[in-house]
Image: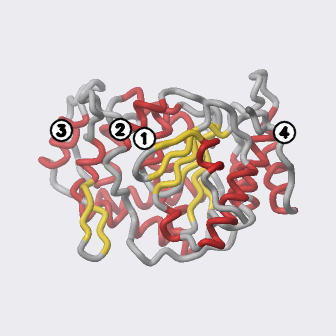
Amino acid sequence: MSRCGAVSHRSVVIAAFAAAVAAGAACTRPSRVPAALTDEEFRNALTAGSEAAGEFVHAENLISNETHFPDMVRLLGSVGGVYLGVGPEQNFSYIAGVRPEMAFIVDIRQANRDLHLLYKALFEISDDRVEFVGHLFSRELARGLPPSVSAEDLFAALDAAEPSPARCESTVTLVGDRLRDVHRLELTPADYESVASQLRTFCSRGPGIRYQTGDLIGPSYRELMTATDLLHRPRSYLADEEAFAFVKDMQARNLIVPLVGDFAGSGALAAAASFAREHGAPIRVFYGSNVEVYLSREQTVRFCRNLALLPIDSRSWFVGNKGMRTFRSKLDACPAE
């Protein structure tokens, strides 16, 4: 049963968010999701859809630590609609497989919003995967790598290349110019420093950078990008040029919108729900990672209220850090208020 007719606006913030993108909605597709957002609409969406930032003190979290995503991507398939996710780069792998019309990435940490703006700029200034990873890790790769290069061979080439601090600083400048002068984002000096600092971390640690919290050490970036599903097929956004190009195209059209928001808050998820409903597009994939582990019972109840706002249909899925289930079954499992 579809829930596309659920209750509408909850706050002035949500109304402002919807108005921010309304001008981009003139398209002929049945879902009415805009083919692109203008830079002004993108800027307004970032502001109107976000809440006050919170803290996540458990890990630096520049990269994910979940290696099961290839099979989740395989099982989900290309379902379209709107994608909602949390966290860093694993979202791109889900987006490349799910092929949504639009995506929102909601995270309580402002640093994660800054990280996704860094990625946005890197996608836009890179023609292909080779140039992208060269920018991300400040390595000059040998010329002649073909577009069909496998992820394994791409990262082997990265491992063989020496890091270049000069290239890193050049990329810091390119990224800042892209966000400031092209997109004219209204970021604070602290935001720009956050973007630059995160890029420098990737530059210094290279493709061996890992998720780490306490004694728990996760997989490296290379291991995540070369991970395969049970059929031995790589599924990351860097697995092949087609996957990379899909995400790059969405970034160029401003259709991946990172928001600062709390899963148990009253702004970001409600804003995404309002946008999807008003544009006739169901949330087809909600990737929640392991966020619920950190929610109290009261916060979980509020999170479930937010989930109930989302327009869904029979092809909507909820994906956690250990597996996936239908969205309807997720709602049915929510605690009673």
Circle 2 sits in a helix, a strand or a loop, which is it? helix
Residue lying at 28% horizontally and 76% vertically, measured from the top left:
214
Q: Which residue is mark 3?
A: 142
Residues at marks 3 and 4, CA–CA distance in whole angstroms: 54 Å
| Residue 69, x across and y down, in percent | 38, 43
The amino acid at mark 3 is Ala
Residues at marks 2 and 3, CA–CA distance in whole angstroms: 28 Å
Above or below, comparing residue 296 to residue 21 in the picture = below
Q: Which residue is mark 1?
A: 93
Q: Residues within 10 Å of mark 4 (few under 14, many from 20)?
A: few
**Image disc number at residue 70:** 2
Mark found first going from the N terminus, 2 or 4 = 4
The amino acid at mark 1 is Ser
Depth check, front residue: 294 or 159: 294
Of marks 1 and 2, the one in the foreground = 2
Depth check, front residue: 299 or 335: 335
Answer with the quarter of the image where residue 24 lies: top right
Residues at marks 2 and 4, CA–CA distance in whole angstroms: 33 Å
Circle 3 sits in a helix, a strand or a loop, which is it? loop
Quarter of the figure with the N terminus: top right
Circle 1 sits in a helix, a strand or a loop, which is it? helix
Of marks 2 and 3, the one in the foreground = 2
Mark found first going from the N terminus, 2 or 3 = 2
Q: Which residue is mark 4?
A: 5
Residues at marks 1 and 4, CA–CA distance in whole angstroms: 30 Å
- Residues marked 1 and 2 touching at CB (< 8 Å): yes
